[in-house]
Amino acid sequence: MIGAQLVKVLIIDDHEVVRLGVKQILEKALPHVELGEADTGQKGIAAVQRETWDLAIVDISLPDQSGLELLCELHSLAPDLPLMVLSLHTEEQYAVRAFRAGAMAYLTKQTVPEELAKAVTQVLAGRMYVTPSLGEYMASSLTKHPTRPGHHTLSEREFEVFVLLAQGQSVRHIAESLTLSIKTVSTYRARLLDKLQLTTTAELIRYALDHRLVE
């Protein structure tokens, strides 16, 4: 697929410098590549609806929606589209959830160009890519059964509400954006505080910052 055939890659990231850097790496690594860009999740969805891509590279933190939510939407919209994540957040924080949402690779923005190129090539070939450090972390989690941070016990919806609250969004705004009732979001908030052993939204925000779950 990567030989003389044109490869179309969509980069969804709100930072222009990141998109430029990824483009330069891929233009060097892939002999025939056409690159597209989107700086919001909704623009990324529109690009996928408009044309066919061979790969989408998605950031976790986008201005209009969670990257995890976007992965689910893209996977539903185009089930055959390979997805990978390039994020500021460490693998331990988001990788497992990203894989559950449909990603085939998870890399941090500290990844060296050679590894990014290797991951892209492997995903384009239809194979998942797991970095050695993530593989070691996942194996350790399975064998040693360490005490995990509270946010690892949250369901996907709970985690989604948690991140939005940690970003400072109001219960009403979250309810509107997730198409839920205010009462339902309030219930999620109470459940989150209980699971994380916190008492206020301010403490929840501090928890998220301490664990680098929001920027």
Image (tube, rainbow, N blue to C red):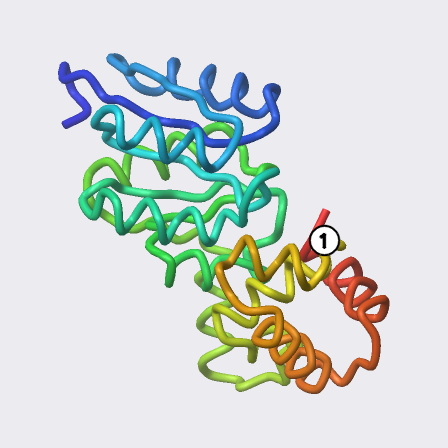
Q: Residue 179 in the image: state x and y as whole percent.
A: 48, 60
**Residue nearest the observer in this picture, 84 or 144:** 84
Q: Is residue 140 above or below residue 79?
A: below
Left or right? Give the position of 191 relative to 180.
Answer: right
Query: What's the residue at 14%, 17% (across, down)?
Result: 5
Query: What's the residue at 44%, 72% (across, down)?
Result: 139
Query: What's the residue at 28%, 16% (across, down)?
Result: 33
**Residue nearest the observer in this picture, 47 or 82:** 47
User: Regarding mark 1 in the picture, which secondary structure is present there?
Assistant: loop
Q: Residue 35 in the image: state x and y as whole percent.
A: 36, 17
Q: Is residue 161 above or below residue 44?
A: below
Q: Is residue 209 above or below residue 34?
A: below
Q: Residue 29 in the image: state x and y as whole percent.
A: 35, 20
Q: Residue 106 in the image: state x and y as whole percent.
A: 45, 48
Quarter assignment of residue 1: top left
Q: Residues within 10 Å of mark 1 (few under 14, many from 20)?
A: some
**Is residue 134 visible from the viewing direction of this image?**
no
Residue to which mark 1 is pinned? 167
Left or right? Give the position of 35 relative to 94.
Answer: left
**Residue nearest the observer in this picture, 186 or 49:** 186
Labels in figure, total: 1
Amino acid type at circle 1 is Gln
